[in-house]
Image (tube, rainbow, N blue to C red):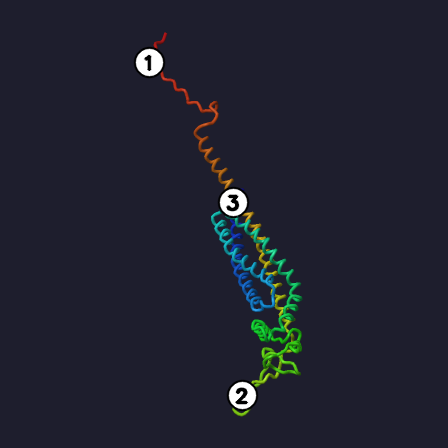
Amino acid sequence: MSQNNLEVGMRCIKYMLLCVTAIFVLTSALIISVGTTIYAIYYDVSFFLDYQLFSPATFIIAIGVIMLFVSLFGCIGALKESTCLVNIFAVILSLVLVLEIAAAITAYTLRSQVSGMLDSNLRETLPYYYSNPEVTDSFDFIQSRLNCCGIDSYLDWGDVKANRTGIDVKNVTVPYSCCAQTNYQEIGEVQYEECVKLYANGCLPRITYLIYQSAGLLGAGAMTIAFIQVIGIVFSFSLASSIRKTKSERERRRWEIQERMINAYTSLNPNEEKQKPIVYVPFHGQTTA
């Protein structure tokens, strides 16, 4: 009965470990997708970001790739009932768990630095809009994609000396990327595009919110995977322990069966050997007195 209970318990843990491993594969693919998406978002505005902000996204992508390969150890170890593979799976999960917690802490820590860093970088680069093509492309990108103008508002462009045509609003020349709505007019045979509405909001609050939420999503994703990993680690060590117990129990029962088969024919104690029955055979040459 105890042997059957042990086999059933190990089978249950094995199937649960396989289910958790399958979840690892799905969540690893998901976290790689999230990491690459956020990395792409950071890359689009990388001109205004410090390189350290890319570390959590890169870390999450690397963790997702590692988890895909680690899942193979869990699957093969559970199917083959290999204590070594299951233990390797559990140990690597534990190491990755530490890395994920570090990535989550880093992501949440960097969130507090986003606002000040972006404010400083935007204000330092804005005066070079007309002289530096890279600054021009970066500001045009965030203004057109985030539907914003300037840092706090379009009035920030009043401090920038314009050396090319733009949109004149109250003696302030703003780039064409600040235009929210245009209207086409025909004068004679020539068609002109006129901006009739500017983006009202500045870019600083919007880009800060974007980076802030992205960092929070990275941290939440890392902690979610970490929670699933804790379950996987517990099941892995439990399965390894069950495999060892089952193999020991099998060896013990095999040894008992062998001993019983041997003892059925011969006894280890010679004094307890069964004696053969004595048979008396009459001697015909004997005479009676």
Closer to the camera in the image, 113 or 209: 113
Circle 1 is placed at which residue position? 284
Q: Position of residue 281 (x, y in %)?
A: 36, 17
Q: Is residue 270 above or below residue 40?
A: above
Residue 191 is labelled as: 2
Residue type indicated by callout 3:
Ile
Closer to the camera in the image, 216 or 24: 216
How far is mark 3 from mark 1, CA to CA? Answer: 72 Å
Query: Which mark's residue is nearer the viewer, 2 or 1?
Result: 2
Q: Secondary structure at mark 2?
A: strand
Circle 3 is placed at which residue position? 243
Closer to the camera in the image, 200 or 261: 200
How far is mark 2 from mark 3, CA to CA? Answer: 81 Å
The answer to which of marks 2 and 3 sits earlier in the sequence is 2
For image coordinates 48% across by 36% down, the residue present is 255
How far is mark 2 from mark 1, CA to CA? Answer: 148 Å
Q: Secondary structure at mark 3?
A: helix
